[in-house]
Each structure stands twice: as C-alpha cells, then as structure tokens.
Amino acid sequence: MVAPRILVVDDEADLRELLEMTLLRMGLDVDSAATLQEAHGFLARSDYALVLTDMRLPDGLGLELVRAVCAGGKNTPIAVVTAFGSADNAVVALKAGAFDYLSKPVALDQLRLMVQSALRLNAPPVALARGGSRLTGQSSAIVALRAQIARLARSMAPVAISGESGSGKELAAREIHAQSSRAEQPFIAVNCGAIPEALMEAEFFGYRKGAFTGATMDRDGFFQAANGGTLMLDEVADLPLAMQVKLLRAIQERRVRKLGANLEDAVDVRIISATHQNLAACVEAGKFRQDLFYRLNVIELGLPALRERLDDLDVLIETILQRLNGAGHKVLLGPGVLQTLRSYAFPGNVRELENILERALAFADDGVIEVANLALKGARTVLPADAGGASAAASELPPCLPDYLDQVERDIILRALARTRFNRTQAAQLLGISLRQLRYQMQRLAIHAPEP
C-alpha cells in the first residue's frame, strides 16, 4: 500500500526538519520545499494528500500557494503555519480556502491531529451514507444550500450559520459534521443562552475536583467532550462579554484550562456558531466583541426561511407526518389543507410547521387532517372547488363582502412581505403603492412582522 505523501513548505530548516521527522514517524512520505517556486514545482509533478506551508516565504506569501492549490481543482487540502499572535493571518487563509492552520511554535500533538483529519477527507462520510441528507427538499434554495454544505465539510474553518428561528440551523450544523472527516467523532450542541453566567466557564472548560464548593470530582467541559469533533455554539450572541474573551482565547490557542488546573489541555474542535440575531449589528452596538466575530464568522452560511422554499412544503409535510405518526400509519390531508398552508407566512418556519401538524394530527378524525384542525391565524382558508351547479356557485359567495375583501387584501400583502423578507419598502414597490399606504393597511389589518 502506497503511503500518503505530504508536501512541507517552510524556509526555516530546523522547523522543516522537525515537521518531516514527525510526519515520517507517522508512516507518511514527505517532500519539502523552502520557497514558493520549489513548492509549485513539486505540485506540478506530484499529487499530495496534504500541503503544509508557512505564511511567510522568501519569494512570497503562503497565501499565494493556498489560492493556487484551491484553484487547481484537485481538492488537495492545504494548511498554513502562522506566527504566534497572527490570528488575523489564519482567518485570511481560511477565508481563501485553507483546510486548517497551526500556530508557531508548532505543537506536535496538534500537528498529528490535523494531519489525521486531513487524511480522512477522502474517506466516504459514514454518517451521511447511513441516512441521507437531513435537509429535506428539492427547491433551488435547499439544493444550493446542500451544495454549499458539501464544500464547507472539506474545511476545518469556523462556520457562522444565520437564519430565522426554526429554519433548521442545528440541522445544517449536523449536516456539515456528518459530511466531514469528523463524522465519527462527537457533535456537541450548546445553547449559549440557556447557561447561567456563573456556570459558563465550568461548563465550557470543565473543572478539577475541589475547584469550588460542590466540585466533588473532575469533570470535562464542552470543549473536551467535543474533542476530535464539532462544537456548535447555538445562540452565540447571548454570550456575556466576559465569556467572549475566554472563548476567543480557547478558539485561537486550541487549548483550554479546567477550573482549578495548572496546565492547559490541547483540544481539536471545529467551531460552528449559530444565531437568529444580526451579529454585525451586535458588534456595532457593543454587545459582541469584534475580534470574536471575525474569528467565528470566517465562512457564512445563510438558511432560507420556509416562505422562501414553499416548493418543499409537500415533502416536508410528508416527512414530518411520517415521523409523528409512524411509517406504517397513513395520514391524509383533507380538501384545501395544502393550499391553506401555502398561503401562510410561517414566521416560525419549519419548527412552526412541525407544531402545526402535530396539533392538527391530535385533533384529526380517522387520520384525515382538515383545514379546521390547522387552527392558523392569518392564513387564507382555501375551499375545494365543486362543479355541482348553481348551489355550489351560491355557496362560494362570501357571507360578508367587506370581511372577504379585507382577507384577500391581507393575503396579498402577506405574500408581498414574505417575498421581500418583510422589507416594507420593497413590498410597497411590488404592490404599486406608497410605503405610507402599506403601513396604514398593515396597521388596519393587524399585520405584524415576525418576531426575531
């Protein structure tokens, strides 16, 4: 069996020799170069399982090599070695497509972990192969999202997931983990807004026995529990400023110190953060540290709202009902149910759809969900068409014309607002009315923007 080959690019002979010896002891073949020109020559002649380059070289920057390797189309992972305290350089390299980074002085244990992670990249994602994608649907928005996740899974760069509440941010994070080389390692999801501030340091970094009153045994924190895998920081905007400082250091140094311990422990964790808030606005307001924002926001992943992917409604409903009622029990949708759901804005997104269907299923008779079981507020009820003659035509007449017209107008305004993600100025332009007119009609018809 041919050993994987690694290319090491560094102009410091001592460091280059140390890296070579470490990689050779791991059973790998190694080529080494001292300049960008030499590195390009090796890349032109051979394929590599990993390229490891210093950021500063005699004839240029390692960043140039990162861009060249990423543009080569071979999917070769490339990692960079940055000087101590040059975290900004690491972020720039990750944004340019680098797989990962190491800080000087290079810790050999971190080097081995990174190399092992890179070598697993070409292995099939076991976790995904078992059950397919967690992100259901075939709309253009969800297809593009799955393609972006497939690219993100090949990197160790931090990912910041944004999206409205209920849009599936944790599902997307789990999908990234499942398709990555860390799929067989732990995935730990943490709701940052649910941890009391006094306990945050102990929860994130762990503690030693006797570190404080009640610490009767050693305990690992979230970082240690996720070691080798992925740590998802959900609602990261809710972290207090004091904890943001400690979190920033742990992410940059990849080391954590338990409460009551003297030494730091190395941790190999990929960070995925998520929030429904606008982090950039939180930075401007002084509620979130700018340096931590840049550290977490290396790659952005935006999730579409359900109202932007209504083409997926049919398959989402089928999947949710199958999970709620079991695969062996068929649930039917009564006349007008699907059309009524399509007319709804879903401010709570897929999570709200799940709640609506669970409630409807509880009230359904004989496994048939009717429009009345949905109990939707603000949705246009769609009655089934009936070709039964004059009596059917008469039944379609509204009992109160003003109320009916108000409902029609409300539905049209909601659809325009949904299409513009509740941007009132754009919605008014779509409807051909002034912003003042739109505001008046929204107030009159009790139309409110969804809560963030």
Image (tube, rainbow, N blue to C red):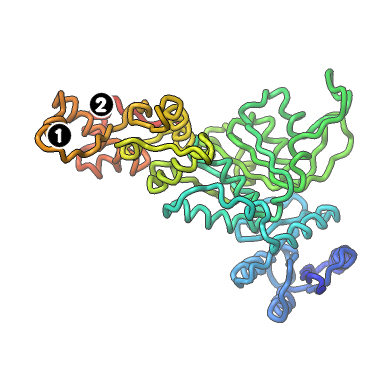
Binning the other alpha carbons within 10 Å of mark 1 as few (below 14), some (14 to 19) or many (20 upward) gives few
Q: Mark 2 belongs to which amino acid? A: Leu
Judge by depth and name the residue closer to the eye, 117 or 159: 117
Whether residue 262 can be seen here: yes
Instruction: Determine which of the numbered discs, if any, sits on residue 261 in the image.
Output: none
The residue at the point 77 percent across, 52 percent down is: 84
Residue receiving disc 1: 392
35 relative to 150 in the view: left or right: right
The residue most toward the left is: 390
120 relative to 105 in the view: left or right: left
Q: Quadrant of residue 255?
A: top right
Whether residue 280 can be seen here: no
Judge by depth and name the residue closer to the eye, 12 or 408: 408
Q: Mark 1 belongs to which amino acid? A: Ala
Residue 18, horizontal then vertical, whole percent = 88, 64
Judge by depth and name the residue closer to the eye, 275 or 63: 275
Q: Quadrant of residue 425?
A: top left
Residue receiving disc 2: 445
The residue most toward the top is: 213
Tell us which disc is closer to us: 2 or 1. Answer: 1
The residue at the point 64 percent across, 52 percent down is: 130
Residue 403, horizontal then vertical, whole percent = 19, 25
Q: Is residue 54 above or below residue 218?
A: below
Q: Secondary structure at mark 2?
A: loop
Q: CA distance from mark 2 to mark 1?
A: 29 Å
| Quadrant holding the N terminus | bottom right
363 relative to 209 in the view: left or right: left
Q: Quadrant of residue 93?
A: bottom right
Residue 85, horizontal then vertical, whole percent = 74, 49
The residue at the point 69 percent across, 36 percent down is: 245
